[in-house]
Amino acid sequence: MYKIIDLFCGIGGFSYGFEMTKCFKTVLGVDCWNVALDTFSKNHPGTKTELIDVKKLDQNYLKKYINKTDVIIAGPPCQGFSMSGKRDIFDVRNSLFKEVIRIVSIVKPKVVVIENVVGLLSMTTPEGNLVSCEIKTQLDKLGYAVECNTLNAADYGVPQFRKRVVFIACQKSMKKDIMFPSKTHGTKDVPFVTVGEALDNIPNEGDTYLKVRNDYQKLMAGTSHIYNHDVIAHSPLIVQRMHSVPQGGNWKNIPIELGQGGGKHSNNYRRLKNDEPSITIKHVSKSMIIHPIYDRTPTIREVARLQSFDDNFIITGNKYDQHQQLANAVPPLLGRAIARSVLELLKK
């Protein structure tokens, strides 16, 4: 088994996807949000966790992992790079990629994978250098060959359009060509997995799944009891607003006399379409994303399905935090696709 360290691990969607290959074992998960780390621990039994700022991981702590770790994976906070944020070049979160590289310089893994939002590609450091170039340059100085590509989770069987920039680096001494995963979905023969295919065996009420109806549901299937599926009771006004929005519609479809919900972002009060992958999942309660059929926001379990977390994966914390944990996560099926490319690098 190849050994992984998962930095900024959150709930561990990235490492969960790596472990789906049955070839990787996560030996350490690091995050500074205790709620997410609790979820990580529940779903990564036997993995050591550290509730700590990565800046405090020094050489003394990391010495037991030096030259004994095959892969470091990391998803540094993306809010400072997001196109929907302020994109402040002085946002301290934007420099956390340097901590990943610092830890790489100590641990010396064979492979490094860094994931983030596509907005990173157009961001600069305070010194005026493109962040993407800075990542490549610093890893190159450490002796790593680096490639960067933009991947869409829907291309790998996730029922959600979710683009992410991915850096894969390997030690130059390995003398391997870095290849990104080939698309497995989105063709005439193998179409994208849709919202309807992902959700239609989860009942609106009840705590037991309906009969599995397709390959995606078969892949996600686990416990027959539905966890994290508490349906929210919206106010009558919210229900009225949602009822007026057709599949694919948004706040613009809400009659003015109902208030239109305040926000003007295109995904506010967006009702998902049954016959397409979902829009990029953020915090569904903040955006008031609407279930394709019912006049309510998706439950935690339904969002987990749209993120490709299987039915055995249990999210802890209060409902608000649970939605944020899922919004922050790397879809496991995207992680699995990347892991398969990493396996090709690690094979002798």
Image (tube, rainbow, N blue to C red):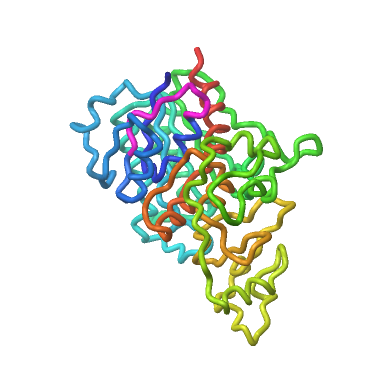
Q: Is residue 98 left or right of residue 191?
A: left
Q: Which of the two residues, 201 or 274, is positioned nearer the viewer here?
A: 201
Q: Residue at x 43, y 38 (%)?
A: 137
Image quarter where the N terminus lies is top left
Tell me which segment is drawn in magenta: 19-29
Q: Check if residue 337 falls in the magenta segment.
A: no
Vertical comparison of 160 with 187: above or below: below
Spot the residue most to the right. 188
Vertical comparison of 22 with 229: above or below: above
Residue 242: give x, y in percent of width and height: 63, 71
Residue 123: give x, y in percent of width and height: 48, 55
Residue 262: give x, y in percent of width and height: 55, 79
Q: Is residue 320 left or right of residue 179?
A: left
Q: Which of the two residues, 60 or 29, is positioned nearer the viewer here?
A: 29
Residue 67: give x, y in percent of width and height: 31, 21
Q: Which of the two residues, 28 or 203, is positioned nearer the viewer here?
A: 203
Q: Residue at x 44, y 44 (%)?
A: 314
Q: Residue at x 31, y 28 (%)?
A: 107
Q: Residue at x 57, y 46 (%)?
A: 305
